[in-house]
Image (cartoon, grey):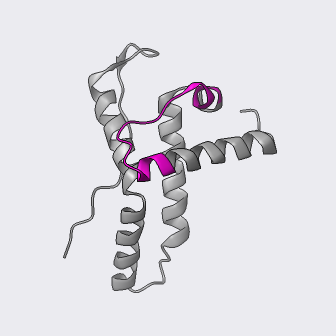
Amino acid sequence: MIPMSWTETHRRWQALQEIEALASAGCAELPWNTEYAEIFGDRDTLAAALRYRLKLTHDAQLDTHMSETVMEEQRLRLFERNAGVIRLLRNHEAAGARIPNQRRGSLSVARPVEDTPVSA
């Protein structure tokens, strides 16, 4: 894999922030345009980048030294803050289960997004 330049990395993170803002504003489908195609190549790679960013956020903000109650409260806050992105990923994965993947000639199988938290 060829390393990205600072400019390419910045452009990628900026695109992810734009997509997160669209998701928070209610966008239901994974946004796609020529700029995103240049950056990510395809929608599956974009979805993988969003999943990775969610994982980084989760890992950075959940401390295993927190009490169970505090950790659950923080997990719920993270879910609420990222609900739009999670919705985009779920909708993308649901569409992938119905649409044959053109590259492999088979159905896409996407990694699951963390389930909705259960209210107490």
Query: Depth check: 44 or 83 in front?
Result: 83
The residue lying furthest to the front in this view is 25
State the image coordinates of residue 71 (x, y, percent, origin top left).
Answer: 39, 78
Query: Depth check: 95 or 26 in front?
Result: 26
88 to 36, vertically: above or below: below
Q: Is residue 43 rendered to the left or right of residue 75?
A: right
**Residue at x 52% of width, y 36% of height:** 46
State the image coordinates of residue 73 (x, y, percent, origin top left).
Answer: 35, 78
82 to 30, vertically: above or below: below
Residue 8 seen in this snapshot: yes
Residue 23 is inside the magenta segment: yes
**Residue at x 70% of width, y 41% of height:** 11
Q: Is residue 54 rendered to the left or right of residue 99?
A: right
92 to 85, vertically: above or below: above
The residue lying furthest to the left in this view is 120
Q: Which residues are magenta?
A: 21-38
Residue 51 seen in this snapshot: no
118 to 92, vertically: above or below: below
Q: Quadrant of the C terminus?
A: bottom left
State the image coordinates of residue 38 (x, y, percent, origin top left).
Answer: 64, 26
How many numbered marks does the figure carry?
Answer: 0
Q: Quadrant of the N terminus?
A: top right
Q: Is residue 86 rendered to the left or right of residue 16?
A: left
**Residue at x 54% of width, y 27% of height:** 33
